Amino acid sequence: MLDFWFSVLSLIPFYFIGAIPAGFLIAKSHGIDITAQGSGNVGATNVGRVLGIRAGIATLLIDLLKGIIAVLIARLIFNNSVFYGSAGAVVVCGHCFSIPGKLRGGKGVATSFGVLLIFNLWTALLALGVFILVFWRSRIVSLSSISAALSAPIFAILLGADDSIFYAISFIALLSVYRHNENLNRLLSGTEKQFSLAKKD
């Protein structure tokens, strides 16, 4: 029992890595409250739409690194797939439900991709391929993200991921779809917008 609670407490720092509100802080440095602009989301897509490509890419890279760094640290601490799989899920939860960001986190796409890169490179690259293909055809980020998220567990099991990693990837995929619930409603009603960037850069 003590080992269980020690493991649970050991995951808390990974939540706070994920909870760093990169998009919110970048927008704040420009004098903008990103939660009151565009879609109100603090992720790279909305930051890019509001502030331009450089701010969007900066947000994307920081969010990506959160996932990479968290899982790498977890593997260094305890190279057990249950532990670092859980750390990957927790860092994405931190991103999506950020206490420092007043629970106005992002959709978790970039952070999830960072986690996937360390879980299994080929799963990550194949899911990225799905994202690129769907985006190339639709120019809709949300549809591309949902498609990539749902494909990831399939690729993971086809590539022989162990149970712990498969469950972690499945959880992350379902969380990503849940975070896109408003986008799903707009997709179903045909009102979801195609992606465009602000021209501030």
Image (cartoon, rainbow, N blue to C red):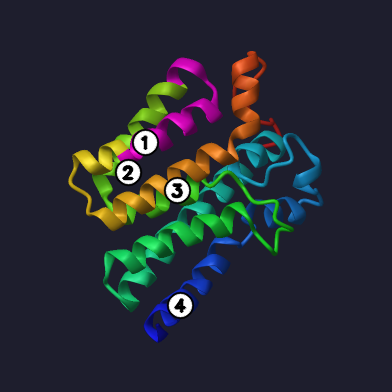
Label 3 or label 1, whichever comes before in sequence order: 1
CA–CA distance between discs 4 and 1? 30 Å
For the residues labelled 3 and 1, the Cα–Cα distance comes to 15 Å
Instruction: Tell me which numbered mark, 3 or 2, is placed earlier along the sequence.
Output: 2
At x 48%, y 51%, the residue is: 111
Pointer 2 residue: 124
**Which of the two marks, 2 or 4, is nearer to us in this view?**
4
State which mark lies toward you, 3 or 1. 3
- The residue furthest front is 1
Cβ–Cβ below 8 Å for labels 1 and 2?
yes
Identify the amino acid type marked 3.
Ile
Label 1: which secondary element: helix
Q: Secondary structure at mark 2?
A: helix
| Relative height, residue 135 to residue 163 (above, below) | above
- The residue range painted magenta reads 136-153
**Mark 1 — residue?**
128
- Name which of mark 3 and mark 4 comes first in the sequence: 4
Three-letter amino acid code at disc 4?
A: Ser
Read off the residue under disc 3: 172
- The correct choice, above or below, for 178 with respect to 98 in the image is above
Report which residue position mark 4 lands on.
10
Determine crowd level at label 3: few under 14, some 14-19, many 20+ residues with C-alpha closer than 10 A. Answer: many
Badge 4, how many Cα within 10 Å: few under 14, some, many 20+?
some
Image coordinates of residue 108 in percent, x first then y, are 53, 47
Question: How far apart, in angstroms, are the residues tagged by discs 1 and 2?
Answer: 6 Å
Q: Earlier in the sequence, mark 4 or mark 1?
A: 4
In the image, taking residue 131 as reference, residue 187 lies left or right, namely right
Give the amino acid type for the residue marked by disc 1 in the picture: Leu
**Mark closer to the chain start, 2 or 4:** 4
Mark 2 residue type: Ala
